[in-house]
Amino acid sequence: MSLPNNAYLAQITPILPVKNVLHALEFYIKKLKFELVFIDEERNPKYAGIRRNNIALHLQWQDASEWGISKNRPMLRIQVQGIEALYKEYQLMGVFHNHTSLEEKPWGNLEFAFYDPYMNGLTFYHSL
């Protein structure tokens, strides 16, 4: 049986686990300047979608029992145009940790990284 060879992967939308969707939305919207695309319910949401430019993320509530288990959280790498401006923007918003810096990496990227309030890793990079 021959399968067609025209498959195309168009985009990816990561789902980040969070303890409180409203709290996560506040961080991503107010601090990182994402926009709300949808929310499953206004008062006690369990799932929401956000977007900034071409980057879409979903935020999903996870039960407290999920957080008691030591496990790795997602790590996202987001390609950026104007990385210096984004770094300054986020620096002014106070989202960085003590050791966050804009660095040139040996693999040819200029990048910075930090964690959201739920320890999901965010790395923003620009290829040199």
Image (cartoon, helix red, strand yellow):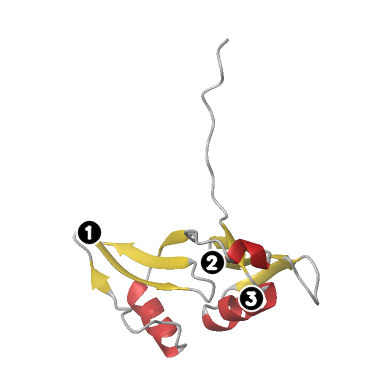
Q: Position of residue 111 (x, y in %)?
A: 31, 68
Q: Which mark is residue 49?
A: none
Residue 78 visible, this orientation: yes
Q: Is residue 126 above or below residue 99?
A: above
Q: Residue, x 67% and y 74% (percent of image)?
A: 20
Q: Position of residue 95 (x, y in %)?
A: 45, 83
Instruction: Give me the C-alpha separation between circle 3 and circle 1.
Output: 32 Å
Q: Are marks 2 and 3 in contact (CB under 8 Å)?
A: no
Q: In terms of secondary structure, where does tag 3 sit? A: helix
Q: Residue, x 44% and y 66% (percent of image)?
A: 121
The disc, 2 or 3, on the residue closer to the chain's N-terminal end is 3
The three-letter amino acid code for the residue at tag 1 is Gly
Give the class, few, some or many, for how many residues have Cα within 10 Å of label 2's Cα (few <14, many ≥20).
few
Question: Which residue is tagged 2?
Answer: 53
- Tell which of 69 and 95 is nearer to you: 69
Q: Position of residue 26 (x, y in %)?
A: 62, 81
- Tell which of 42 and 68 is nearer to you: 68
Q: Residue, x 73% and y 66% (percent of image)?
A: 46
Q: Position of residue 9 (x, y in %)?
A: 52, 40
Query: In front: mark 2 or mark 3?
Result: 3
Question: Which residue is tagged 3?
Answer: 25
Q: Which mark is residue 108?
A: 1
- Tell which of 61 and 52 is nearer to you: 61
The three-letter amino acid code for the residue at tag 2 is Asn
